[in-house]
Amino acid sequence: MQSAIWPAVERGRQYAFAAVWAAVFATGVGLSEPLPSLDVAPYLSLAPVGTASAAALEPPRFLAMNAAPEALVFVRYDVSEPDDTFHRSTRELSFGHGRFAAPGNAIRRQVQLRQISPRTADELAGFFRDVAYILTDIRQGEAVPPIKVERVPADLVNKDGNERKALFITALLPVVLEVNQRVLADREQLLYLRDKMASEPMRVSPIERIWLEDLADRYGTPVDRIDELVRRVDVVPPSMAIAQGGVESGWGTSPAARAGNALYGQIRSGSPQPFTNVGEATDAYIANLNTHPAYAGFRAARAALRERGENLDGYNLIGSLLRYSELGQNYVKFVRQIMRENELTDFDRARLSSF
């Protein structure tokens, strides 16, 4: 019986590929629509945020404007806060590209980062020396090496203030740029589909519609509110992220930062929210700014800069995060001081190297 069936199976294989393609074209799910070229480098002029620790529950100490503060208190907003959009926790929203990546080759154009997990601050500094990763060079326009620090070494607290800050900034910058890079890939595809739906709605493929629905779900807004979705799918200036990360985690030295990679002051059930690694924490921070109703003002200010064709300015945009801390305007003033003292806005123009 086997000998009788096998020739038929072999003949079927010859036509299987053609049959599959015929089925694809018959259903109209064509993948031939070219996507626009995406060059992420011009957009990577942005920044990220901070963390909270057990010390964050104590009265804040930075009113004296100490440039190396303890972790600050993050104002907690429960998911039940009224909003006119569907809201999910930042942890549900923040990781990867959801069930579907962007159609086409947008993901292939992204720089892949090499992960490192230094055990000590000296090991971290040695790695930066080995790859010639120097902040002075980045300020002058050199590309940022594609490396991803998994966690901040616990003994970073033993370094003096200037060295500690330099190591923290150097470690966090490529992580922020990598998250922004993924957001930009989604934004580019979103803008392409928005224009396509406006001009040729019948040519939007089923796969593109599925991707768009998934993106809207991840960003907590209905898919038919396309302008709101465009406001949400955007980057956070690196100067903002690094300054808030430094303030909220005491430059990576708070207990929450050392034990749970909590760099940005995010609170869950009254305690600092732990994360598996620094990348996950940064993902959640940017997702939080892009989705939570408390930061609608930040998203509106960022969109206004986009509409005027201006660069995203972290120093100005931090002024829209009055609700990030219970200290309000004093918090904003202090974060801006950190930006000035460490010249963090230089990194809003930074880009990842492709090697």
Image (tube, rainbow, N blue to C red):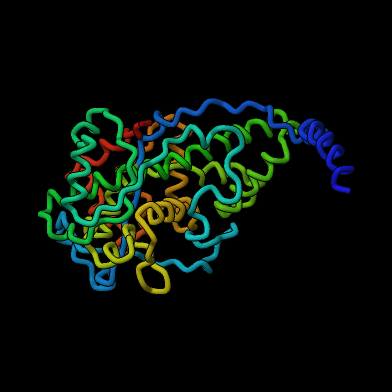
Horizontal and vertical percent position of residue 4? 89, 43
Q: Position of residue 330 (x, y in %)?
A: 25, 58
Query: Does residue 99 appear to the left or right of 75 in the view shown?
Result: right
Q: Nearer the viewer, residue 102 or 285?
A: 102
Residue 28 visible in the displayed image: no
State which quadrant residue 52 falls in.
bottom left
User: In what quadrant of the picture does the C terminus appear?
Assistant: top left
The foreground one among 5 and 118 is 5
Counting labels gives 0
Q: Residue furthest left?
A: 160
Q: Where, by quadrant of the figure, is residue 62 drawn? A: bottom left
**Left or right: 19 with respect to 195?**
right
The residue lying at 25 percent from left, 63 percent from top is: 71
- Is residue 33 in view from this perspective? yes
Q: Residue at x 87, y 38 (%)?
A: 8
Q: Name the residue at 61% across, 37% down.
A: 103
Nearest the eye: 254 or 47: 254
- Where is 125 relative to 20, above or below? below
